[in-house]
Amino acid sequence: MISYKCVRPILAAALLTSGLASTGAVAQEQSVLRVVPYADLRNLDPVWTTAIITRHHAYMIYDTLFGLNEQLEPQPQMVADYEVSEDGLTYTFNLREGLTFHDGAPVTTADVIASIKRWEARDNAGGALAEVTESLTAVDDDTFELTLNTPYGLVLESFSALTGPFIMPESVASTDPFEQVQSHIGSGPFVFNEEEWVPGNKVVYDKFEDYVPREEAPSGAAGGKIAKVDRVEWLYLPDPGTAMSALLNNEVDYWEAPPVDLVPVMEADPNVSVDVQDPFGLIVLLRPNHLYPPFDKKEVRQALAYMVDQSEYMTAMVGDPKYWQTCPSVMMCGTPTETSAGGAERMVTSDMAKAQELIDQAYDGETVVVMHPTDHPSGPAALITAAKLRELGVKVELQAMDWATLTSRRASKNPPNEGGWSIFHTRTGLGAASPIEHSGVAAGETAWFGWPENEKIEELRIAWGREADAEKRKAIMDELSAEIMDYGSFVMLGQYQMPSAWRANVSGVVKGPILGFWNIEKQ
Amino acid sequence: MLAYAVRRLIATIPVLFIVAVLIFMLLHLGPNDPAAVIAGDFAQPEHIERIRQQLGLDQPLYAQFFDWIWRVLQGDLGASIYNQQPVLNLVLQRAEPTIALTLSTISFAVIVGIPMGVLAAWKAGSIVDRVVMVLAVTGFSLPVFVLGYILVYVFALNLQLLPVQGYVSYKDGLVPFFRSLVLPTLSLGMIYVALIARMTRASVIEVLNQDYIRTARAKGLSTPPILLIHALKNAAIPIVTTIGLGIALLISGVVVTETVFAIPGVGRLTVDAIVRKDYPVIQGVLLIFTVVYVLLNLLVDLSYSLFDPRIRYQG
Amino acid sequence: MAISTVSTTRTPSRFRLLLGEGGTFTRRNPTLVAGGVIISFLALLAIFAPLVTRYDPIALDVVNRLKAPSSEHLFGTDMMGRDLFSRVIYGSRVSLMVGLSVAAIATAIGLVIGLAAGLVRWVDVVVMRVMDGLMAIPSVLLAIAFMALAGSSIRNIIIAITIPEIPRVARLVRGIVMSVREQPFVEAAIAAGTKDIPLLRRHILPSTINPLIVQATYISASAIISEAYLSFLGAGTPPEIPSWGNIVAEGRALFTIAPGAVLFPSIFLALTVLAVNMLGDGLRDRLDPQMQRSLR
């Protein structure tokens, strides 16, 4: 039997290799934490792009002036101490001693100022700070001064914004903010290993031996960032089934964002722990295009808030109710800005009769183009919105596309039937706790895709940012919420947490709104 | 022979130029704006416009085309608009897993497929032939991902014999290297085994039916194995042709296999680049794949003379 | 051609080996019948899908998501609570339509190009170069790139899969034209002053029919696989249309806890491709034993 003879050695070889081999790669002396992040790291410059994966990267290799702790309070990080003048207009900051970049150069105020300026040119919070800044100057190498032209309540909040500023060497930070930086030197707890970077697959970080951590315990993005592993490897595995198998087979140690549906399988394995790393999680938004019918009419936009049933969206997107909540607020729930003023609770449950009434009043039979991103967690939301609108007798064209296409398409101000759009959905993180950073709120010149135009919202938003008193700020927020609900800028579809999973021999995962790999140990 | 090879090589140049034009035109049909994709989820519209200018995407098409061609001729395939790595580096970085997977698949297919085909030809019409042919047509009809998921389910998840995903370089140990290749090779190789088995069977049967073999048999040279070896030698050319033609099939399969098994190869690079509209990478990779494919086919053509001394090439 | 020599007698294998392969290939081929029966059955399911299924294949029912197979939902439900049995049955519409359309269009266009190339010198030089160029680009990559950039729709996927198939048909037809022209009776006809059109009608077209039928069958099998690959990779049929590749692509994330969404469409897909390939083999054996080597 010829074929048998030839097949046998292959079978034998297969059995041999499977029997003999050890469980993984060759044993290594250094400790390596193998991580599956939620996405592929495409860009390395956190100023140039707002992608959350790039922010993760930035917290690995850069340090920040302030960091938000687990309770979302700004804590000094690179800053040792600071003073505020009595009129509240001058801030003086002193850097900690001994801070160095990965190339050995000391961190000076020149580096800090250049980094702040580059960040201000692109970031929402940074731009707001720049507007109230009179001057930003170095006193000496370790001290710098920020002078404001008007009192501003959010200076420390800005410097601890999740989106930066990340401190880069002056030579790097002087790159045009609209070009990517070419060098990836920071002063953070890990060093980016550029040689071993395989875009689309693997990112490697080595421990920065000369990092000077703070003495406080780690909390969120604040406190001592002590690297307890020698090396962190991010392996991008887009297929959740593959990622889970890899975790169960001990081929990776940490999986940032497993689908909730897979959690029970992993919980059943004693070698795997599942927990929520970011307790605030993400909110999901429905955004109509205010420029074109039918969503140029307030009534039709208002109908959306009556139409939606947050539980339905959350069940489809997340599944297990343990990991999601309904959120009767235009701002993220569980944060100081949460408020249901203006009837925000109507977004929680569906009132189709009321929605129908509003539709009948103002809808003229225009076709609504709903963009459906098939490779993004908000995909199921598009399907539900389309089904609900059809139930109301609205003509819907559901257009499937990948997330990349959606992000190009939504920038188009063309009419929906000429390459534009009517509705998209997205999710966003903690920035949604501040009307300055929350992209959906702005309703003036800097309005986000969907282009609402509402002077009152703009005024309230800016007033909120400038108000230092917490009580008054709350009152402004309530007024803002009522205006947003009436105007129908966007609809909140719920809030959810992403569980993360890691091998039981991994400990010391720091909770908070950012994912950092300091303090994590591997036995 | 050498002159023939050179002439064939030169003949590929117009083909490659046409390919370059086709690829470029294809990519610029789309309504997509890489600048918006790059700028990220919460970017402001005016930021996107600035990025578009930075990338030269606001230039007229023909300018972009000649710019690209000119740089390609100088060996510069451009850089990814996302991570700014040179396309050539990206491909080289990922070439090893793809080459390893391709070679192991071809070896597997040849080692299994040819004996299967010969066996079927030898026993033509018998139940063995039937079984082999049914297996072959089944193998040919099993899409790569179907087989891949079934194999992962059985061997990696339930029996835990083999790794679920990924690729281990031969530099990190031969045993893990081969282990990481077993399931992808089986999933990808089945179609190829089927193809080679069918072609071998058909070619051997044809040779067996030729006059000189019948004469040989009549002369008493009837021991089947010897006869088969003789037949196989004469059937080599169609088989080699099949292997060559199968490379196209293999490239398609590699893309899917690398996706199923999370292998960081050129196939996944391509799919990722296409999904995120990374123009320079898509152009570069398609061009490289095409050049490799054209050269491999040339090699297959030239190898005919090895298998059949009767073929002589005219300069 | 071979049709006239079909014989139903079964001959002992050793005897046939000595006599030659004619017996094997002209004997009535059971694969043809089996393939035909399976395809007809699938086609009936596809056509009468609304009668066969109880649920709308795109109706969402998130409360009942990820249900295991039961009498209520024969194949269970997917992550949006949609009935998988309905989706798989409706999915056969997409596969069969793509298979048929691609085969028909690629054959028609390929035939025209191949005839032109075989008869007109400059077409041969120019168009066949472009065909060579197209053939040199790996077909699935070409199709994914086209889909990703042109946007997903059934029309685009048919175009994307058809383009790389055209050169294959064109080459086949061109080869046939060339060989027919060299045959003595055709040479005689040309010498006698027969014009191109009657030449085509009388001699060339008839000899292309059988190989084209066989080739078209194989093209539809490969088109069905290509559609599934493209959809699986996320660059295929619009996701709101249930196609087998789409169902697998959506289901693979949860393969470990709900394998049905991967396995059921996969079984249908494999079976369909198998049946079409069997049909092709059967047709080839009956219609055109000589061309076996030129295929695939």
Image (tube, grey):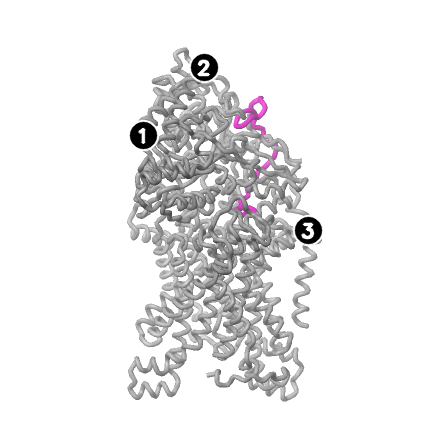
Task: Classify mark 2: helix, strand or loop.
Answer: strand
Which amino acid does the dot numbered 2 rest on? Glu
Q: Residue at x 42, y 16 (%)?
A: A469
Which amino acid does the dot numbered 3 rest on? Ala
Above or below — where is B265 with respect to A424? below
Above or below — where is A1 with respect to A143? below
Dot 2: within a 10 Å radius of its alpha carbon, few (fewer than 14), some, or many (20 or more) residues? few
- Is C172 situated left or right of A203 in this image? left
Name the residue carrying label 3.
A21
Above or below — where is A66 with respect to C219? above
Q: Which mark is residue A83?
A: 2
Image coordinates for residue B297, horizontal then vertical, percent: 47, 66
Mark 1 and mark 3 lie on one chain; the one further toward the N terminus is: 3
Name the residue carrying label 1.
A454
Query: Observer-nearest residue: B68 or A437?
Result: A437
Which amino acid does the dot numbered 1 rest on? Asn
Question: Which chain's residue wears label 2?
Answer: A
Q: Residue at x 60, y 83 (%)?
A: C10
- Labels 1 and 2 touching (C-beta < 8 A): no
Which quadrant of the structure image shows residue A51? top left
| Total number of numbered discs in the rendering | 3
- Magenta segment range? A213-240
Cα separation between marks 1 and 2: 38 Å
Cα separation between marks 1 and 3: 66 Å
Say if the magenta span includes residue A214.
Answer: yes
* Quadrant the C terminus of chain B occupies: bottom left
- Determine the residue located farthest toward the top in the rendered image: A86
Query: Observer-nearest residue: C169 or A309?
Result: A309
Task: Classify mark 3: helix, strand or loop.
Answer: loop
Say if the magenta span includes residue A237.
Answer: yes
